[in-house]
């Protein structure tokens, strides 16, 4: 890692140790020392370029190591603590923070490190319209440690935020991609099962459309699904089964999916449990 440190002059301009202060380099005092809520003074442009490149190199690669990121943040915190929130939430040209990248890479040790700073803007939307929570919904987190970190992120962020393009929530994304573990976490963190995207689809409709029968069962078992909802072409996630088919079974509640022609058969086993059988017609 590049060896560097920050020094602050009395007028809040920022420079790398060993480089000339922008004010002394002939840049006007007002320009060199003026700062705003977006970060350090604009006069330290060279410093920011170095900081920007080094931070994303250290924190945002698939092979990034939590120990290296920890040392980097510790150094910033010790030398120039006012820069720490700025560094943690730096965005690149695509609007991605280190948190976006570490989540996308399923690099949960780095995700945890970033979240533990208490500085992450977890609901920051990148240019593609996704928050870190939405990206987490697409990951294949399986281990107990990874799921614990994913849950930490979900609790800190807005699980019901919608993507800019299609208006999908994290739950819809997890359902569509068959991420069972993430679906369970999202449901446990208060995800709205009846939220609808711009096409009017719900999470249950997504499960039906993609044939994710186990996930459909998980959604229905919450008892919160409103099966009367329709999308923009007036399709339900489920609808009553025709009498000609229901006559062949013994006292079940039967529904047939309007999205993928799958038979959803609830067979009552007891007063407190149901078995879900789904078979393609």
Image (cartoon, rainbow, N blue to C red):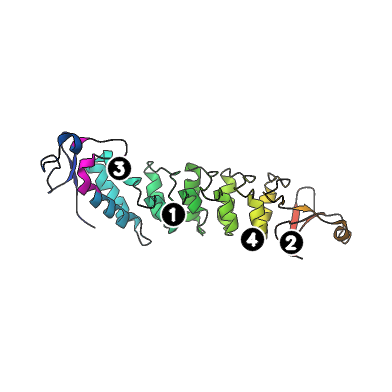
In space, the residues marked 1 and 3 are separated at their CA atoms by 20 Å
Residue 148 shows in the view:
no
Could you say which disc has been placed on residue 84 in the image? 3
Between disc 1 and disc 4, whose residue precedes? 1
Could you say which disc has been placed on residue 91 in the image? none
Between disc 1 and disc 3, whose residue precedes? 3
Q: Which residues are magenta?
A: 33-48
Look at mark 1 in the image and give the residue it sits on.
103
The residue that appears at 31% across and 36% down in the rendered structure is 37
Between disc 2 and disc 4, whose residue precedes? 4
In-image side of 187 versus 65 (left or right): right
Instruction: Please report contact status of discs 2 and 4: CB closer than 8 Å, yes or no.
Output: no
Q: Nearer the viewer, residue 65 or 195?
A: 195
In space, the residues marked 2 and 3 are separated at their CA atoms by 53 Å
Between disc 2 and disc 3, whose residue precedes? 3
Could you say which disc has been placed on residue 261 in the image? 2
Q: Is label 1 or label 4 in front?
A: 4
The correct choice, above or below, for 1 with respect to 11 in the image is: below
Q: Is label 3 or label 4 in front?
A: 4
In space, the residues marked 3 and 4 are separated at their CA atoms by 43 Å
User: Residue 115: image x %, image y %?
Assistant: 40, 46
Specify the farthest residue to the front: 233
The 10 Å Cα crowd at callout 1, few under 14, some 14 to 19, many 20 or more, is many
Could you say which disc has been placed on residue 210 in the image? 4
Q: Nearer the viewer, residue 227 or 249?
A: 227
In space, the residues marked 1 and 4 are separated at their CA atoms by 24 Å
């Amino acid at each position: 890692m590049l060896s560097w440190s920050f020094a602050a002059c009395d007028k809040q301009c920022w420079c790398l140790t060993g480089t000339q202060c922008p004010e002394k380099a002939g840049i006007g005092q007002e320009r060199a020392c003026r700062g705003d809520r977006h970060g350090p003074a604009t006069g330290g442009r060279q410093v920011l370029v170095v900081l920007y490149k080094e931070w994303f190199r250290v924190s945002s690669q698939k092979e990034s190591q939590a120990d290296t990121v920890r040392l980097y943040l510790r150094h910033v915190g010790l030398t120039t603590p006012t820069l720490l929130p700025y560094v943690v939430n730096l965005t690149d040209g695509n609007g991605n923070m280190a948190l976006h990248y570490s989540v996308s890479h399923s690099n949960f040790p780095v995700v945890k490190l970033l979240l533990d700073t208490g500085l992450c803007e977890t609901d920051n939307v990148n240019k593609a319209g996704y928050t870190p929570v939405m990206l987490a919904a697409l990951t294949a987190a399986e281990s107990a440690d990874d799921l614990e970190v994913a849950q930490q992120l979900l609790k800190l962020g807005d699980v019901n935020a919608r993507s800019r393009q299609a208006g999908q929530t994290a739950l819809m994304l997890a359902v569509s991609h068959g991420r069972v573990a993430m679906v369970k976490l999202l449901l446990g963190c208060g995800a709205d099962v009846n939220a609808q995207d711009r096409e009017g689809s719900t999470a249950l409709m997504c499960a039906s459309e993609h044939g994710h029968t186990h996930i459909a069962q998980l959604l229905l078992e919450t008892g919160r699904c409103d099966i009367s909802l329709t999308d923009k072409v007036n399709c339900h996630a489920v609808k009553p089964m025709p009498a000609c088919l229901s006559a062949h079974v013994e006292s079940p509640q039967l529904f047939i999916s309007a999205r993928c022609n799958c038979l959803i058969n609830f067979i009552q086993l007891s007063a407190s449990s149901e078995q879900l059988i789904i078979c393609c017609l």
